[in-house]
C-alpha cells in the first residue's frame, strides 16, 4: 500500500470536470485508489465520480491518497501529479481560465414575442416522472436488471449524441458537462446500487433508480460548498433522463425566483398559464415553433420568449445570468458586462396592457377601397380579458377554453366555467365572444390514462369531447347559461366531417332541453365549427349547411395539410404557412361559406401576421381574429391597402406550385406596391 498527502489548489475545488479527469487517470490503473479527507470526515473511491464529489473538496482541502495493488506506486504518482497540475484544466493564472470556462454562450432560436430581458435561469423540466413501486417476481429479477441496463445504454447513446453536437456547435469548453453526465451514468456507484436495490427489494427499475437517485441527491444538498452542491442538478439530470427512458412523465411545477427566466426543454401551455407572471421575466425552450400553443400563450401574455433552442437547457444551471432577446431570437448565457451594456432591456413581462386604451382605435377597419374587416381577439386566459378593450378588438373571435383547465387533469366545474364565460361575455361586449369547446389532447396537456402513440392524430378536440360526454355536457351547459348574460357563441374544434357536427349538435340540443325542463335560465347560441383538418376542408360545402359559422384554424390546417408537427423545431422548415396546398384549403373554405351565406372568422396565427392578413383579405376574408397586441399593427396595414390589389396578388399565389414561389411573389409584389408598409423583415424570408 502507498499513500501521499495532497492539497486541492484549483479555485473551483474538486468539481465535476476535475473529478472527471481524476476518474479518467485513476481508471488506467489496476490498483484500488482512495481519497480521504485528512479530518476523516469522508472517503471516496477515486474511480467513481459520484463518490469523489461527495468529498466536497473545495480549494484548500487536504486529502490522503491511498493506492493498493500491483501498480500502486505508478497509480499514486499519476494521481498526485494530476493534483499538482490542478486536474489539467486551469493554468496557474486561473482567473483568466475560469473566465473562459464560464464564457458567454450565445444560442439562436426563434423569438416568438417581443422584449429583451436580463434575468436568472430557473431550470424547469416538464413533468417529474410518475414513479410507481412494483414488486418483481423472483424469476423476473434478471430481466428487470437487463431492462435497467438497456435504459442506461440508451441514455448513454443520447448523451454521446448531445455531447458531439455541443462540441460542434459550442466548442469543447461547453461540452465537458456531458462528460461528467456520462461518467455519472457509468459510475458503478450508481448502476451497482440500482441493480442491488432491484434484487434486494424485488423492485422495478424505475423505483430503484429513483430511490438511489434521491439518496445521492440528499448527499449533495448537504455539501457545504455552493459550487459543488449545485452539481446535484447534474445528477438530477442524469436520473431524470434514466427515468424518462424507463417510464412516462407527470406534472411538476417550479418554485419561482424573482427575475426568473424559465429554461426548459419544452413547456406545456397549461404550465405557462399557471406561472406567476410577477416573477417570470421570460421563457426559453429547446422545443417549440411559432404556432405551438406555448408560443401563442407567451405572446398573448406579453411574455418575452425564445423557443426552438435545441440543446440549450442542458447548458444551463439554475441561477445562471441570462439575456433573452426575443426581438433578435437569441439567448445569451453568462453575458459579459460589455454585452449587458450593449443591450436595451425592456421591463420584463410586457403584458397585454402595454398599449394604453386611449391610443387605440376600435371597431372594424376599412381598406382604401371600402371593404370592412372585423378584427377580433384570440384569448386564452381570464387575465387577458381586458386586452379586448385595450387593443380595440371587435370582441373575442376565439376563446381557447381548455386553458381554464390550467393544471393537467383538472376539469373545471360547471359553476366555475359559467362564471368564466360570463365575465368573458362582459369583456367582449356587444360584439360577443366565441367559446371553443375544450380542444384538449394533442399538445395541450391533460392527464390521460393511456398515453397515445400519436396524440395530434388521436383523441383530440371534438373526439375527446364525444368520448367524454359528461365533460362536454358540463361545458355546454355552462356556455348556454352564461349566454343568457351576454353575447356568446360556441365553436366545435377539429371536426372532420358532418357526422362530428351532428353528434355534437345532438348533445347541445339535449342539454338545452334539460335546462328547459329544469327551469334554468339560458339562451340558445350560434354554433360554428373549426375548419382545420383537410377532410373538413374537402367537405366544407356540406358542413356549411349544418352550422351557423366557420372558424378557420390555420395553425392546424398547416400542420395537418402538410403533415408537419407544429411544435417540433426539427421540422419547422417544412411548416410553410404560404404553401399552395394551405392556400387552396383556405380559399375553398371561404368559398364554401360564401355559397352557404355563413360567416368565417380566420383565427390562426396567420391572421396576426400583417403580410398574411393582406393575403387573407385578398382571398375574401373579412373577419380576422388574432393575438390582441397585434390588432393595431394589422389594422394599420389593412387601412392602407386596397382589397382589390390584395385579390390580384392572392389569385396569382393560388396558381403557384410551391411555397417558395408564393413567398417570392409576396415579397416582390408587396415590396413594389407597399414599400412603406412592409420593410424586408416584415415579409417572408
Ligand atoms: C388553429 O389551429 O389555427 C387554431 C386557431 O387553434 P389552435 O391554435 O388552438 O389549435
Ligand atoms: Mg387548432
Image (cartoon, grey):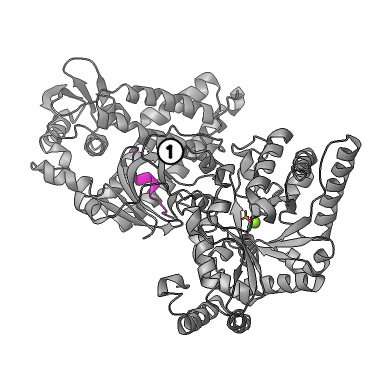
Location of residue 346 in the rendering, given as x and y in whole percent from the top left corner:
35, 51
Ligand number 2: quarter of image:
bottom right
18 w.r.t. 438: above or below: above
- Can residue 285 be seen here? no
Q: Which residues are magenta?
A: 309-318
53 w.r.t. 475: above or below: above
Location of residue 233 (image quadrant)? top left
For the view shown, which residue lies furthest in the left direction? 92
- Can residue 569 be seen here? yes
Element on which disc 1 rests: loop
How many neighbours does mark 1 have within 10 angstroms: few (below 14), some (14-19), or many (20 or more)?
few
Q: Nearer the viewer, residue 476 or 16?
A: 476
400 w.r.t. 71: above or below: below
In the shown orientation, is residue 377 left or right of residue 232?
right
Q: Under 8 Å from ligand 1: the CB of mark 1?
A: no
Location of residue 57 in the rendering, given as x and y in whole percent from the top left corner:
21, 26
Location of residue 665 in the rendering, given as x and y in whole percent from the top left corner:
52, 82
Residue 237 painted magenta:
no
Image quadrant containing the C terminus:
bottom left
221 w.r.t. 610: above or below: above
Q: Nearer the viewer, residue 238 or 500?
A: 500
In the shown orientation, is residue 425 left or right of residue 2?
right
Magenta span main SS: loop
Location of residue 134 (image quadrant)? top right
In the shown orientation, is residue 287 left or right of residue 330?
right
Image quadrant containing the N terminus:
top left
For the view shown, which residue lies furthest in the front direction? 358
- Which residue corresponds to mark 1? 278
Location of residue 50 in the rendering, given as x and y in whole percent from the top left corner:
32, 30
**Residue occupying the point 64% across, 38% down:** 447
Amino acid at each position: 500500500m502507498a499513500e501521499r498527502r495532497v492539497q486541492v489548489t484549483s479555485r473551483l475545488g474538486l468539481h465535476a470536470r476535475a473529478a472527471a479527469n481524476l476518474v479518467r487517470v485513476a481508471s488506467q490503473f489496476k490498483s484500488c485508489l482512495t481519497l480521504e479527507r485528512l479530518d476523516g470526515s469522508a472517503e471516496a473511491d477515486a474511480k467513481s465520480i459520484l463518490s469523489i464529489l461527495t468529498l466536497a473538496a473545495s480549494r484548500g482541502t487536504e486529502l490522503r491518497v491511498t493506492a493498493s495493488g500491483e501498480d500502486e506506486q505508478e497509480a499514486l504518482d499519476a494521481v498526485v501529479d494530476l493534483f499538482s497540475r490542478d486536474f489539467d484544466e486551469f493554468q496557474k493564472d486561473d482567473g483568466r481560465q475560469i473566465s473562459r470556462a464560464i464564457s458567454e454562450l450565445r444560442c439562436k432560436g426563434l423569438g416568438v414575442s417581443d422584449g429583451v430581458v436580463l434575468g436568472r435561469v430557473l431550470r424547469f423540466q416538464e413533468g417529474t416522472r410518475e414513479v410507481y413501486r412494483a414488486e418483481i417476481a423472483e424469476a423476473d429479477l434478471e430481466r428487470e436488471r437487463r431492462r435497467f441496463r438497456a435504459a442506461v445504454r440508451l441514455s448513454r447513446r443520447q448523451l454521446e449524441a448531445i455531447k458531439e453536437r455541443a462540441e460542434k456547435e459550442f466548442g469543447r469548453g461547453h461540452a465537458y458537462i456531458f462528460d461528467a453526465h456520462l461518467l455519472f451514468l457509468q459510475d458503478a456507484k450508481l448502476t451497482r446500487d440500482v441493480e442491488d436495490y432491484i434484487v434486494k427489494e424485488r423492485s422495478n427499475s424505475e423505483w430503484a433508480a429513483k430511490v438511489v437517485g434521491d439518496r445521492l441527491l440528499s448527499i449533495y444538498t448537504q455539501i457545504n460548498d455552493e459550487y459543488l452542491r449545485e452539481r446535484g442538478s447534474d445528477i438530477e439530470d442524469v436520473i431524470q433522463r434514466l427515468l424518462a427512458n424507463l417510464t412516462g412523465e407527470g406534472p411538476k411545477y417550479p418554485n419561482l425566483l424573482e427575475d426568473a427566466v424559465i429554461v426548459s426543454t419544452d413547456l406545456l401551455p397549461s404550465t405557462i398559464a399557471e406561472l406567476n407572471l410577477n416573477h417570470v421575466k421570460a421563457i426559453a425552450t429547446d422545443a417549440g415553433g411559432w404556432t405551438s400553443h406555448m408560443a401563442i400563450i407567451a405572446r398573448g401574455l406579453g411574455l418575452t420568449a425564445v423557443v426552438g433552442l435545441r440543446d440549450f437547457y442542458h447548458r444551463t444551471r439554475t441561477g445562471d445570468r441570462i439575456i433573452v432577446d426575443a426581438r433578435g431570437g437569441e439567448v445569451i448565457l453568462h453575458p459579459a458586462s460589455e454585452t449587458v451594456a450593449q443591450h436595451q432591456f425592456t421591463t420584463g413581462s410586457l403584458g397585454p396592457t402595454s398599449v394604453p386604451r386611449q391610443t387605440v382605435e376600435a371597431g372594424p377597419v376599412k381598406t382604401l377601397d371600402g371593404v370592412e374587416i372585423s378584427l377580433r381577439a384570440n384569448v386564452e386566459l381570464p387575465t387577458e380579458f381586458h386586452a379586448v378593450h385595450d387593443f380595440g378588438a371587435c370582441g373575442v373571435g376565439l376563446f381557447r377554453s381548455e386553458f381554464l383547465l390550467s393544471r393537467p387533469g383538472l376539469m373545471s366545474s360547471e359553476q366555475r366555467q359559467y362564471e368564466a364565460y360570463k365575465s368573458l361575455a362582459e369583456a367582449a361586449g356587444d360584439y360577443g365572444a366565441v367559446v371553443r369547446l375544450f380542444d384538449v389532447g394533442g399538445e395541450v396537456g391533460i392527464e390521460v390514462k393511456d398515453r397515445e402513440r400519436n396524440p395530434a392524430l388521436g383523441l383530440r378536440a371534438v373526439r375527446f369531447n364525444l368520448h367524454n360526454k359528461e365533460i362536454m355536457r358540463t361545458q355546454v351547459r355552462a356556455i348556454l347559461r352564461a349566454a343568457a348574460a351576454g353575447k356568446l357563441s360556441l365553436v366545435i374544434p377539429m371536426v372532420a366531417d358532418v357526422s362530428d357536427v351532428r353528434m355534437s349538435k345532438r348533445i347541445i340540443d339535449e342539454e338545452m332541453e334539460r335546462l328547459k325542463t329544469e327551469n334554468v335560465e339560458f339562451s340558445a347560441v350560434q354554433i360554428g365549427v373549426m375548419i382545420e383538418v383537410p377532410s373538413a376542408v374537402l367537405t366544407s360545402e356540406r358542413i356549411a349547411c349544418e352550422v351557423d359559422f366557420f372558424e378557420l384554424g390555420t395553425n392546424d390546417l398547416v400542420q395537418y395539410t402538410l403533415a408537419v408537427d407544429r411544435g417540433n423545431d426539427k421540422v419547422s422548415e417544412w411548416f410553410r404557412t404560404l404553401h399552395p396546398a394551405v392556400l387552396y384549403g383556405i380559399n375553398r373554405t371561404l368559398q364554401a361559406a360564401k355559397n352557404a351565406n355563413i360567416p368565417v372568422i380566420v383565427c390562426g396565427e396567420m391572421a396576426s401576421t400583417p403580410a398574411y392578413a393582406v393575403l387573407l383579405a385578398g382571398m375574401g376574408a373579412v373577419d380576422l381574429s388574432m393575438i390582441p397586441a397585434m390588432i393595431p399593427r394589422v389594422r394599420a396595414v389593412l387601412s392602407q391597402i386596397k382589397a382589390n390589389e390584395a385579390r390580384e396578388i392572392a389569385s396569382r399565389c393560388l396558381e403557384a406550385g410551391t411555397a417558395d414561389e408564393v413567398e417570392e411573389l409576396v415579397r416582390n409584389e408587396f415590396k413594389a406596391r407597399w414599400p412603406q408598409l412592409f420593410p424586408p423583415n416584415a415579409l417572408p424570408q
